[in-house]
Image: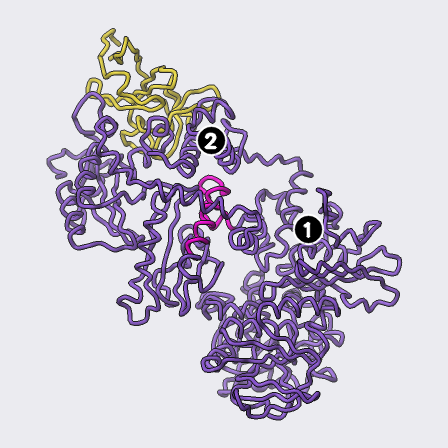
Chain colours: A yellow, B purple
Amino acid sequence: MSDNWIEICKLEDIVPDTGVCALVNEKQVALFRTRNDDLFAIDNLDPFSNANVLSRGIVGSLGEKLVVASPIYKQHFCLETGTCLEDDDVKLSVYKVKAEGNSVAIQA
Amino acid sequence: MSKQRIVIVGNGMVGHKFIDNVLNGESRDQYQLVTFSEEPRQAYDRVHLTEYFAGRSADDLLMAPVGYYEENGVEIHIDEKIVDIDLNAKEVISASGLRVAYDKLILATGSYPFVPPIPGHDKEHCLVYRTIEDLEAIKASAKDATSGVVVGGGLLGLEAAKALHDLEIQAHVVQFSDRLMDVQLDVGGGAMLKHKIEALGVQVHCSKNTINIADGENARYRMEFADGEVLETDMILFSAGIRPQDELAKKVGLELGPRGGITVNNQCQTSNEDIYAIGECALWNGQIFGLVAPGYQMAQVAHDHIVTTGETENVFTGADMSTKLKLMGVDVASIGDALGRTPGSHSYTYVDEPAEIYKRIVVSEDKSKLLGAVLVGEAEDYGTLLQYALNGIDLPEHPDSLILPSRDGAAPAGLGPDALPDTAQICSCYDVTKGDICCSVQNGAQTIGELKDATKAATGCGGCAALVTQVMNSELENLGVEVNTDICEHFPHTRQELFHIIKVEKIKTFYELLEKHGTGHGCDICKPTVGSILASVWNEHVMDSDIHPLQDTNDYYMANLQKDGTYSIVPRMAGGEVTPEKLIVLGQVAKDYNLYTKVTGGQRIDLFGARAEELPEIWRRLVDAGFETGHAYGKSLRTVKSCVGSTWCRYGVDDSAGLAVELENRYKGLRSPHKIKFGVSGCTRECAEAQGKDIGIIATESGWNLYVCGNGGMKPRHADLIASDLDKETLIQYIDRVLMFYVRTADRLQRTSVWFDNLEGGLDYLKSVVIDDKLDICGDLEADMQHVVDTYECEWKKAIDNPEKLKRFRHFVNSPEKDSNVVFVETRGQIRPATEEEKKIPVAEVV
């Protein structure tokens, strides 16, 4: 992994507590902004449905974990680790993401 | 081993029950069943016969659907009377000469109405009330009648009077004895019942002995009474008791009672050991049982005796004749020795004249046991009193506390379920004991709905629902099961509680609610639930930044997510109406965006395969053409399905399509715990299938019948008739109330059918809330609904005028490209999502 940060969008392009989808080196990344303006990024491809939809899931928490629920079959993925809570064997890639001023960037 | 053949003569409720017992039994494969019915249709629910006048069809009343017998290998002969039995050859012989051999014969021939031999009793418009054919004759006779008399003021007589009343002719009841329901009620109870029934417009004449039926002067007939008085009437219904149908048994020499009835032993065997008699034709210990529950018990006893070849311990030991019913809206109940005939017995009476309530209990000489009771006007104590009487439970120190109203917040003197023995029968319709309920709870049933599925308790008359719930809760408590009804880990509340909090504390956002009443960040359970409640209460735009993150993707994108990540679009077509111009626009849009097009079950058109980023442009064109959102994506009102109605249809009696359009436009946009569907039919042919909908409306000659809480789908449920012959204004008022009451009190994702099944008190309770306004909330419910109606706006129309919000529809936040993973192939001339295998084929070959 390089130190190459790619600027994606402005912070206000993401409604707090929701996600957007970013195209990063031909790969689809789901990028989430919490109410506290913490940012997380995981794969956008839902491995259970093979559809690019995870950025459209509902963001929340289960226990201590911040999660997004797949809008298709409702599995939960941990935003920090990419692990599926319902199936330990399924783990999505996670990406580093930061906000500098008003600008959101992902490490490619 | 070859199968034994059981022939069942008579296909009424009890005969059907016997067949059902065999089919549901473990030894069903050992028996071949043949049944004969002299009526032209298979077994139907005679107990609810009056509902035939209230809009239920003959098919609705069937005990089992048409084809049930055939599918289960039962040979059924309809309209074929058995006229003889060859006891030596063991064969029955039908009217058409058919001979069928039997190993065991069941006589379930029922009873016939007794018609007193009054001169003139056989005139054309002198009828009886027993079969669907009788009801049709009554209907025909009532067409040109303005008045009708029922002879007999017993239970059936009063039901017959209700039927006449429903047919809108002046009903009279002529009773030989000094009071109504003299078998069940004492003088005081009978008088209160008479008073209440007369207030409803039925005239009651007691102590009248009819001696002649002559031709009338101002009506068809003139009834002449022994006391010299006369009564003119256009028709007469005899309901002066029943007589066992024992003609066949008599012909072949089976033992009968001195006043009729086929004598049976405790095993329900007649004097011929291969022939059993069950139900109203059977005479046990000198008694005929004219209720369905004892008939069912007999059916079970005969079944058990046959399949165990006599080894069973199940014997018939008589039956409790206690009854609770609603006669023309009046609660009436009678338990045990209601008339206080037991030597030395005492009684307590409570009369509330203004509220028209009469209660009396009869207790043993030492005041320790309850022997009987009479309740008129209010019968809520029935369940408790019955348990005291049946189980010999010791009475409290002051027995009158059982019928005195509880005042000043004192706890009612009810009977805790723990006081009941396991053998206590809780549901008499399905013979479910306390032990059965506890057993089901131990096996995992935790809600009244689950318990109904498991035991059938409270699914008959429903009178035991409150007690069943108490027993269930008590058993759950005994098991140490803490029933967690919290919606999820973030809120220690049910949906109903959250609704209340949001409304009372005027909470407008999820985050405010979470801060005040919850923990964590919320989840995909509580967020959409709260989003839905906020919409039901405040009705603000779904894309507002505080609300938008709560929405499931369907509500977020205002379209229906499909398996490949694309969406489908369903514009509203109220009542299924669409102009050719709009239909052309829809077709053109579908063509331009290459959308798969399908007509839905709700009479509108669904366009599939739109990418998220295409939704705003598509909706711009649809809105410009005058379309509004159809809310197909929401837990909200979907469609009001209708037939074309009286405007076009030769048979229609009212404008169902017009009403459907009006209702759909009234309730569109209402967010609710789950989706809501309506149906409006213009006549009883019911082409709109309204009785399978959450709200169903059927036109009648004199207004609209309202049905509630039906469902198609996973677990079909016929809707219940809640009110008849309503004018439009009242109809809408009742719908407002039912829907808002549902929105307030249902669990998340609970359809009205399940909500209804879990409603303690069932249909009567729902009626008391939304018609009688027992909770004093109808004004609120209507105001809440009016707010939703007044604040409606098309979500899409509002969204497409806001460029900032439309940005949220982009697939990539940082690129105009499309999702390359969305691939279509063609089937039957339209697109469909490609399978994973098809996606691997190079694109050029796919398209």
Query: Residue B281 placed where, x, y %?
Result: 65, 77
Question: Which stretch did the figure color magenta?
Answer: B731-756
Residue where numbered disc 2 is placed = B506
Q: Say whether residue B88 is visible.
A: no
| Residue B4 screen position, x and y as percent | 57, 71
* Picture residue at 34% right of the left edge, 58% below the top: B659
In the rendered structure, find residue B434 and report the number of the disc placed on it: 1
Residue B755: in magenta span: yes
Give residue B381's position: percent from left, percent from top.
70, 54
Which quadrant holds residue A89? top left
Give me the C-alpha separation between circle 2 and circle 1. Answer: 44 Å
Q: Quadrant location of the N terminus of chain B?
A: bottom right
In front of the other: B806 or A8: B806
Q: Mark 2 lies on which chain?
A: B
- Which residue does the image show at 64% across and 54% down from the upper left? B464
Decide which of B363, B439 is in the foreground and name it.
Answer: B363
Does residue B154 appear in the picture of this structure?
yes
Most frequent secondary structure within the magenta stretch = helix
* Drawn side of residue B109 relative to residue B617, left or right: right
- Residue B266: within the magenta? no
**Whole-percent x, y for residue B698 in the image:** 40, 62
Report the residue at 29% width, 21% height from top: A14
Name the image quarter holding the C terminus of chain B. Answer: top left
